[in-house]
Image (tube, rainbow, N blue to C red):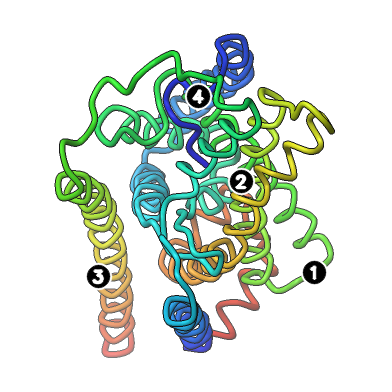
Amino acid sequence: MKLELITLGVLVVFVAAFAYESSSGNHEWGGADGQAGDVISQLTGGTYQPWFQSIYTPPSGEIESLLFALQAAIGSIIIGYFLGYYRALAKTKSAATATEQEAKSNA
Amino acid sequence: MHIMEGFLPLQWCIFWFALSLPAVAYGVYRMNRMIKENREILPLLGVSGAFIFVLSSLKLPSVTGSCSHPTGTGMGAIIFGPWITSVMAMIVLIYQAIFLAHGGLTTLGANTFSMGVAGPIVAVLIYKAAMKSRLNLYIAVFLAATLADWATYVVTSLQLALAFPAASGGVLASFEAFAAVFAITQIPLAIVEGVVTALMFKYIVQLRGDVLLRMNVVSPSTMKSLKEALA
């Protein structure tokens, strides 16, 4: 349980830091990836032009978050399925050994 | 850490592909051999890949007022080694490049190198060093995952700095500029990633400790003391 509590504590601090930062200043909360693009144009004086465009760009922020959510959902299903499967497997195994031992002591 | 599509000059795209493709190819070879020898491992491989899928999809706000995402590669690297993790990272990056316009196909080599090669190698080195100095297993996992995440973003900064040296100050000056964007933002996220990975690792120790023993991830004596602590 200890590690669960530590994790929870760290997450609370993380959210609190976000809440504090959000309320105390004007931030865009934009992506760091995009900011790197700004640094590139600063360094090159705006002369660098990307020489290749994304083959597909989600048509809106909504579609983009849909695809990100899909990515997270697929991953979560796999993790949850196998952890649950393993847990049940361990339980049946220990139950089976318990019955076996009981049968032995009865014999 | 995604370098955007078209944002690296062609020669650097080729350079990073030349470094990351052999790693991925070797990873595919290792993965095939491992699955053939030991099919039981497949679900755990799936879980490690899924962990990368989930964590890299979460764009989190940081104290710098911008958003970035964890990588999730630490766990796969500790259990399966860096090369197999390179394969999983590349799959995620291809998904994001094609469907999300995050990263890109031209920058895939560079992004695979930072997230799938450099980060995982750091994770394995830190994990081994921490276990050798007899740190608690979960602290070792925390340190490995945190530093792997952070190293990924430092490498991204370096990749951009090499491609775009500043007019005055050169590579070092532009590294500072890119690191200010990536490396600082990433510190709190890396810590969160480390803690979550350690927690995930605890469940794997509980449920599939046998696999970790067989893969030589955890020594029998460490496993014994962990199981005793749980009982």
Instruction: Report, in whole angstroms, how far the alpha carbon at label 4 lies from the one at label 3.
Output: 48 Å
Amino acid type indicated by mark 3: Ala
**Label 3's element?**
helix
Which disc number belongs to residue A83? Answer: none
| Residue behind mark 2 | B153
Residue B43 in the image: state x and y as whole percent. Answer: 33, 48
Q: Position of residue B58 (x, y in %)?
A: 36, 57
Query: Residue placed at 54% from the left, 40% from the top?
Result: A36
| Secondary-structure class at tag 1 | loop
Residue depth check, mark 3 versus mark 2: number of the one nearer the observer = 2
Q: Chain of mark 2?
A: B
Q: Residues within 10 Å of mark 2 (few under 14, many from 20)?
A: many
Between marks 1 and 2 in the image, the one whose residue lies nearer the viewer: 2
Relative depth, front residue between B121 and A98: B121
User: Pointer 1 and pointer 2: residues touching (CB < 8 Å)?
Assistant: no
Is label 4 in a helix, a strand or a loop? loop
Callouts 4 and 2 close, C-beta under 8 Å: no
Please, what is the three-letter code of the amino acid marked with disc 4?
Phe
Neighbor class of circle 1 (other Cα within 10 Å; few <14, some 14-19, many 20+) is few
The front one of A75 and B168 is B168
Q: Is residue A62 above or below residue B24?
A: below
Residue B7 bears which disc, if any?
4
Q: Where is residue B63, by image quadrant?
A: bottom right
Mark 3, residue position: A88
Q: Position of residue A14 (x, y in %)?
A: 49, 77
**Tag in front: 4 or 3:** 4
Give the distance between the C-alpha atoms of the residues marked 1 and 2, in whole angstroms: 28 Å
Q: Amino acid at mark 1?
A: Arg
How far apart are the alpha carbons under marks 4 and 2?
A: 16 Å
Q: Which mark is residue B134?
A: 1
